[in-house]
Amino acid sequence: MSDNFPQPPLDMVMPPTAQLVATVCLASVAGLMFVAALVHWARTRNPLFVLGMLGGLLASVNEPFTNVVGMCFHPLIGQWKVLESFGRPIPVWAVMCYPVYFGGLSCLMLLWLRRGITRRKFWMGVGIVMAGNAAFEFPILAADVYVYYGDQPFRFFGMQPTFFVINVLGAVLGALTMALLEHQLTGARRLLMLVIPGVTQIAAYGVAAPHMFTLSTDLPMGWKYAGTTLTIVLGLLVIDQISRYAARRFPAVTPAAPTAGSERRLEVSGA
């Protein structure tokens, strides 16, 4: 075994004030999204958005795995731990990210799919999901609430940009899967919706293989940059293919152009 394998900073201390702020803010956003999902359920008698939010929360069990393969670390000292796996404890604030990102933002994309979507609007949704990711990632990284360690290519402001692409891919895959199965899963089978966010998040890691493999080796940095670049390009290509499929499967309804006969009738009625 190589002695050069990067190790997480085990002596890193969780900043207490930043942890409190991150936890309160993310829990508040998640809570508001849950309330909105419950209101939607009461009005439409359709629990899909509530199931999507709960599924996003359940997907948080993936966090330890993603931390290991992505070389991401939550400080152990002073952490408010919720769960632990792969030897990685996960704090409350990180768990609260999941219903927001893989629940609420996926449900927003699902709403757009229901109403009909174009490729342009799909990519607008992708941009909104990425912006939502950045809104909580950058401040939390700046406060040292967590860190990406090791030789991380393209890291800026502490963030590994690969995860913008992987996270978006997981969120839109979740939205598309729920949209496709919404009318297939009825009755008690609707509960299967709970596993979709977690499954699609892990499915998105298929395109991350080049990044994860090269990151976890002692190869020169050039190879690691190549692996990360390949992952980002593959991820964007897959998202683009999904946008093409979504635009065909859930087409936007465009108003019919008026015919010559209808225009004459309007002129007569106006006269």
Image (cartoon, helix red, strand yellow):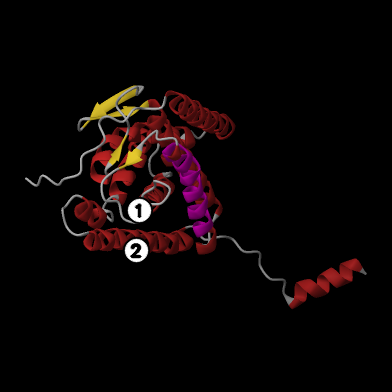
Could you tell me how many numbered marks the image carries?
Answer: 2
**Which residue in the protein does label 2 denote?**
233
Q: Amino acid at mark 1?
A: Thr
Q: Is residue 124 magenta?
A: yes
Q: Is residue 167 above or below residue 91?
A: below
Q: Could you tell me which residue is drawn at 33 percent across and 23 percent down?
A: 82
Q: What percent of the width, then of the height, locates residue 105?
A: 48, 43
Q: Is residue 110 above or below residue 11?
A: below
Q: What percent of the width, then of the height, locates residue 106?
A: 45, 44
Q: Could you tell me which residue is drawn at 36 percent across and 41 percent down?
A: 197
Q: Considering only order in the chain, which callout, 1 or 2, is on the residue closer to the N terminus?
A: 1
Q: Amino acid at mark 2?
A: Val
Q: What percent of the width, then of the height, locates residue 94?
A: 38, 32
* Horizontal relation, residue 130 to residue 6: left or right: right
* Horizontal relation, residue 167 to residue 150: left or right: right
Q: Is residue 271 magenta?
A: no
Q: Residues within 10 Å of mark 1 (few under 14, many from 20)?
A: many
Q: How would you classify the magenta stretch by its main secondary structure?
A: helix
Q: Which residues are magenta?
A: 122-141
Q: Going by the picture, which residue comes out furthest to the bottom?
A: 260
Cα distance in 3D space between marks 2 and 1: 10 Å
Q: Is residue 108 above or below residue 228?
A: above
> Front-most of 109 and 206?
206
Quarter of the rendering occupied by the N terminus = top left
Element at badge 1?
helix
Q: Could you tell me which residue is drawn at 32 percent across and 33 percent down?
A: 74
> Front-most of 238 and 181?
238
Element at badge 2?
helix
Which numbered circle lies on residue 245?
none
Quarter of the rendering occupied by the C terminus = bottom right
Which numbered circle lies on residue 162?
1
Q: Residues within 10 Å of mark 2 (few under 14, many from 20)?
A: some
